[in-house]
Amino acid sequence: MTPQVRKYVHFAEDTLIEGTKPADPPLRMAGVAAVLTNPWAGRFVEDLRPEIHAFAPILGREMVERVGPLVGGFDTVEAFGKTAIVGVNGEIEHGSALIHTLRFGNFLRDAVNSSEFIPFTNKRGGPGNSITIPLRHTTKAAARSHFMTLEFSIPDAPAPDEILIAIGVATGGRPHHRIGDRFQDMEELQHDQTVKPG
């Protein structure tokens, strides 16, 4: 069975004020979700590769083309992520099959000039389930400033025989971020271990 996309959903939010202080510049986070029929629903299929090879590139290309304009082009993107929610007649493996393949993820990586791992979630759920997309910096894995979550929902998706997949991007890190990064922690811990009380 060839999957069919029932709908694409676009989502965007702009944070103008964070912690009572204006965000300068404002942070835009945006996502695109695709709701499609699950070609493997209700049965166990040993080899998922034919559908992955046939359909993941189509989804990857289309979703990346849709998310770019939501943030004014990919030159503005500093963080990215992806997710899949499988309807209750499917396996979590079915959603994973479509997002955990270079045939899908490389479209987003190439668009933002990244070779980094794209953070993800994958789960089973029903209509209105929270679409939770973890984000991180596109090129600086240790940048805690860009550890964020994009979240939205679609009231009628995924249906039991559907898969919902989504990608998300952000134009910056958390407004007023000030907790440093992993490398700063490593340096501080090393210093603490070498400088002991006399």
Image (cartoon, helix red, strand yellow):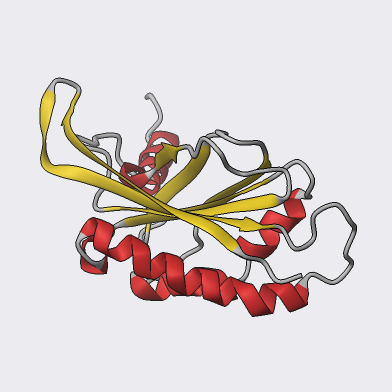
Q: Which sits in the foreground, 79 or 108?
A: 108
Q: Is residue 167 left or right of residue 65?
A: right
Q: Which sits in the foreground, 13 or 137?
A: 13
Q: Where residue 193 appears, x then y in whole percent?
A: 45, 36
Can you say which quadrant of the picture contains the C terminus? top left
Q: Residue furthest top?
A: 20
Asked if residue 163 shows in the view, the reply is yes
Q: Where residue 6 appears, x then y in whole percent?
A: 56, 57
Q: Residue at x 40, y 34 (%)?
A: 192
Q: Is residue 197 left or right of residue 18?
A: right
Q: Where residue 130 appears, x then y in whole percent?
A: 53, 34
Asked if residue 115 shows in the view, the reply is no
Corner quadrant of residue 111: bottom left
Q: Residue at x 36, y 43 (%)?
A: 144
Q: Residue at x 30, y 64 (%)?
A: 68
Q: Is residue 20 left or right of residue 116?
A: left
Q: Which sits in the foreground, 4 or 130?
A: 4
How many numbered discs sit on the rendered protein?
A: 0
Q: Residue at x 67, y 66 (%)?
A: 3
Q: Which sits in the foreground, 83 or 23?
A: 83
Q: Is residue 134 left or right of residue 185?
A: right
User: Measured along the vertical axis of the image, is residue 12 above or below residue 60?
Assistant: above
Q: Where residue 100 appears, x then y in whole percent?
A: 63, 63
Can you say which quadrant of the picture contains the N terminus? bottom right
